[in-house]
Amino acid sequence: MSDTHNDQLATLWQGFLDLPFPQSCYRRSPDGEDLVLLDSHLAGCVSAALTGPLDERRRAALRTGIATVHRILPELADDPEAADYFTRLRELAVLAGGH
């Protein structure tokens, strides 16, 4: 990752860390997805990307997680806080994956 790319990721990550996890997401399972687990997996991969190149397992987890967020976002449209949170998380994941 270039220094500029890494700096952008680090800046966006710090802003994301200030967001509280939406309370409504603890009791929602759009399309059967556990939002807490999805958040944890993607956030872990983004955090790891800040320390160095991702291994294939984490790159695969990012691809899967990005696709999952893309698929479930329409179901979160009625909850602006949840939709914003997962949109931002997806953007971070895309950036962390170098897409």
Image (tube, rainbow, N blue to C red):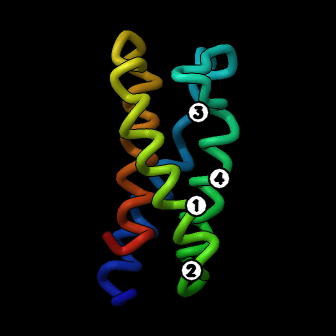
Query: Which structural element holds mark 2?
Result: loop
Would you call the spot at circle 1 few (<14 residues within 10 Å), some (14-19), or many (20 or more)? some
Query: Which structural element holds mark 3?
Result: loop
Q: From the image, which quarter does the C terminus lie in? A: bottom left
Q: Looking at this view, is 71 or 76 the one in front? A: 71
Would you call the spot at circle 3 few (<14 residues within 10 Å), some (14-19), or many (20 or more)? few
Location of residue 81 (image quadrant): top left
Q: How far apart are labels 1 and 4 at the CA level?
A: 7 Å
Q: Which amino acid does label 2 sit on?
A: Leu
Q: Mark 1 near mark 4, Cβ–Cβ under 8 Å?
A: yes
Q: Which residue is drawn at 34% across and 17% down?
A: 77
Q: From the image, which quarter does the N terminus lie in? A: bottom left
Question: Closer to the N terminus: mark 2 or mark 3?
Answer: 3
Would you call the spot at circle 2 few (<14 residues within 10 Å), some (14-19), or many (20 or more)? some
Q: How far apart are labels 4 and 3 at the CA level?
A: 16 Å
The residue that label 2 is drawn on is 54
The residue that label 3 is drawn on is 20
Q: How far apart are labels 4 and 2 at the CA level?
A: 13 Å
Q: What residue type is labelled 4?
A: His
The residue that label 4 is drawn on is 41
Q: Closer to us: mark 2 or mark 3?
A: 2
In the image, residue 54 lies at what x, y percent?
56, 80
Q: What residue type is labelled 1?
A: Ala
Q: Which residue lies furthest to the top in this view?
A: 78
In the image, residue 9 lies at what x, y percent?
40, 68
Q: Mark 3 near mark 1, Cβ–Cβ under 8 Å?
A: no
Q: Which mark is residue 61?
A: 1
Q: How far apart are labels 2 and 1 at the CA level?
A: 10 Å
Residue 81 placement, left or right of 2: right
Q: Residue at x 39, y 27 (%)?
A: 83
Q: Which amino acid does label 3 sit on?
A: Pro
Q: Closer to us: mark 2 or mark 1?
A: 1
